[in-house]
């Protein structure tokens, strides 16, 4: 399996390999920040409701700009938009760590969401454009695996770096508080993230649109698909949006859940996240074989349904060891659907609709994440985590049933087409 991946990797377009290198570094830096930032705010005395509100503000920023970002990416090239996006993300990750003021933190989280929009919209479209149909499953699977491997390293680094900094300063006869150790670690994460810019700068510019006498707003409105096409695009991405609603309820709070429910330290949480993500890497690498065996759509259904029992164990078992094992298996299965969903979405819309479809998917995903974490934070304070896990399981199951209905419709269409061919032959 590994030999097959490496033999395929050597034939990938050069820009695909450049993008993958940048995405790897970006995922390391961003996962350090994702792991530690909420713990940092918690150490500074901010409430769960405030932390949930910050997650919502970040998602609000993403959804405000993700659809215009799709238009701008087509107009000014994928490389330009990636460079601007990643540079600003690294900068504002740094600023929100250095200035944790209760008035500045909301602003930084909102602007950070605006900045990350292009980085969310472009990857699937870029990889689709630069890959051949026969290698596409490997390109999407390798991108997901490499990014997850970067997240694994970032979580391990983020989990252990604060304690390493505290121990190092103690050896020098100085004292470093936990919140200061978090702050320095977040700055390190932002620094690693900024290095990815050098790889994105080497990408070849994608073909941009010709100069137009229309204003940017007029050009943007002219590129919005017709009502019929919008309806089709929404049907394609709807089940993934449902997953986004369920994920926004509980996933952002997993580090806090492990800390508050089981007393896990940042090092233990970092090790747990790294272990889980190392297993997810294996799942991503296996994903092309699964999609070839069952087809992309059936693969989504299988892995999503299979993940539900493990989500239930995560939310209702009292043993940290068993919860960790369930967390590992749940993440392997649910995250394995990611490359399948990206490929399914890109293959079921027109070439000129891909940026818009990707941005619409991200828009609704982040709309849910702009709303649900703030509500979830308040629920945690009053009722704990168990109700949130039930809600998430419900939305994941609903998404899987929608995909199942799509599969049945797809099979009926294939059967009907085959019957028509037989009738013509007869």
Image (cartoon, rainbow, N blue to C red):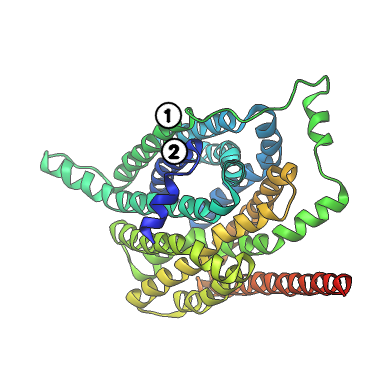
Q: Residue lying furthest front in this view?
A: 426
Q: Whole-percent x and y of residue 155?
A: 35, 53
Which mark is first along the chain, 1 or 2? 2
Compared to residue 404, the image places residue 372 above or below, namely above
Q: Whole-percent x and y of residue 381?
A: 51, 65
How would you rate the neighbour count of disc 2 (Cα within 10 Å): few for under 14, some for 14-19, many for 20 or more?
A: many
Front-most of 80 and 262? Answer: 80
For the image shown, how many numbered marks are present on the structure? Answer: 2
Q: Residue at x 41, y 54 (%)?
A: 5
Q: Whole-percent x and y of residue 222?
A: 84, 35
Q: Where, quadrant-wise, is the C terminus in this rendering?
A: bottom right
Q: Please report contact status of discs 2 and 1: CB closer than 8 Å, yes or no.
A: yes
Front-most of 381 and 87? Answer: 87
Q: Which residue position holds label 2? A: 22
Q: Residue at x 48, y 60 (%)?
A: 253
> Would residue 234 appear left or right of 58 to someone viewing this image?
right
Front-most of 94 and 201? Answer: 201
> Would residue 230 appear left or right of 114 to someone viewing this image?
right
Q: Residue at x 76, y 54 (%)?
A: 233
Q: CA distance from mark 2 to mark 1?
A: 8 Å
Instruction: Tell me if I can see residue 367 in this picture.
Output: no
Instruction: Tell me if I can see residue 228 in this picture.
Output: yes
Q: Whole-percent x and y of residue 379?
A: 57, 66
Compared to residue 217, the image places residue 317 above or below, namely below
How would you rate the neighbour count of disc 1 (Cα within 10 Å): few for under 14, some for 14-19, many for 20 or more?
A: few
Determine the secondary structure under disc 1.
helix
Q: Where, quadrant-wise, is the N terminus in this rendering?
A: bottom left
Q: Residue at x 69, y 46 (%)?
A: 354
Which labelled disc corresponds to residue 198?
1
């Amino acid at each position: 399996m590994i030999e097959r991946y490496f033999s395929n990797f050597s034939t990938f377009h050069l820009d695909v390999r450049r993008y993958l290198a940048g995405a790897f570094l970006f995922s390391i830096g961003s996962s350090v920040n994702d792991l530690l930032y909420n713990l940092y705010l918690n150490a500074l005395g901010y409430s769960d409701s405030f932390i949930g509100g910050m997650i919502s503000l970040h998602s609000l920023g993403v959804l405000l700009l993700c659809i215009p970002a799709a238009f701008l990416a087509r107009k000014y090239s994928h490389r330009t938009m990636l460079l601007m996006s990643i540079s600003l993300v690294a900068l504002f990750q740094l600023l929100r760590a250095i200035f944790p003021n209760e008035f500045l933190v909301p602003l930084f989280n909102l602007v950070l969401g605006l900045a990350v929009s292009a980085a969310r919209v472009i990857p699937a479209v870029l990889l689709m454009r630069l890959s051949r149909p026969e290698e596409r499953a490997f390109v999407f699977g390798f991108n997901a695996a490499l990014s997850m491997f970067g997240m694994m390293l970032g979580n391990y680094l983020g989990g252990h770096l604060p304690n390493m900094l505290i121990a190092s300063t103690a050896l020098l006869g100085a004292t470093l508080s936990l919140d200061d150790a978090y702050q320095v670690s977040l700055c390190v994460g932002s620094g690693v993230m900024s290095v990815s810019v050098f790889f994105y700068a080497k990408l070849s510019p994608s073909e941009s649109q010709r100069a137009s006498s229309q204003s940017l707003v007029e050009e943007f409105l002219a590129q919005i698909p017709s009502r019929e096409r919008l309806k089709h695009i929404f049907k394609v991405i709807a089940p993934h949006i449902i997953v986004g609603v369920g994920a926004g309820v509980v996933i952002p709070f997993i580090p806090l859940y492990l800390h508050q429910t089981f007393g896990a330290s940042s090092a233990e949480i970092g090790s747990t996240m790294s272990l889980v993500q190392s297993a997810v890497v294996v799942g991503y690498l296996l994903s092309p074989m699964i999609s070839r065996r069952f087809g992309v759509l059936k693969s989504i259904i299988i892995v999503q349904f299979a993940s539900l029992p493990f989500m239930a164990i995560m939310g209702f078992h009292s043993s940290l060891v068993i919860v960790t094992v369930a967390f590992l298996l749940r993440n392997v299965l649910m995250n394995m659907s990611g490359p399948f969903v990206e490929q399914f979405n890109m293959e079921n819309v027109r070439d000129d609709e891909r940026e818009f479809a990707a941005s619409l998917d991200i828009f609704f995903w982040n709309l849910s994440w702009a709303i649900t974490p703030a509500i979830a934070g308040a629920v945690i304070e009053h009722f704990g985590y168990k109700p949130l896990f039930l809600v998430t399981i419900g939305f994941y199951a609903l998404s899987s049933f929608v995909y199942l209905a799509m599969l049945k419709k797809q099979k009926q269409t294939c059967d009907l087409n085959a019957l028509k061919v037989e009738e013509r032959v007869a």
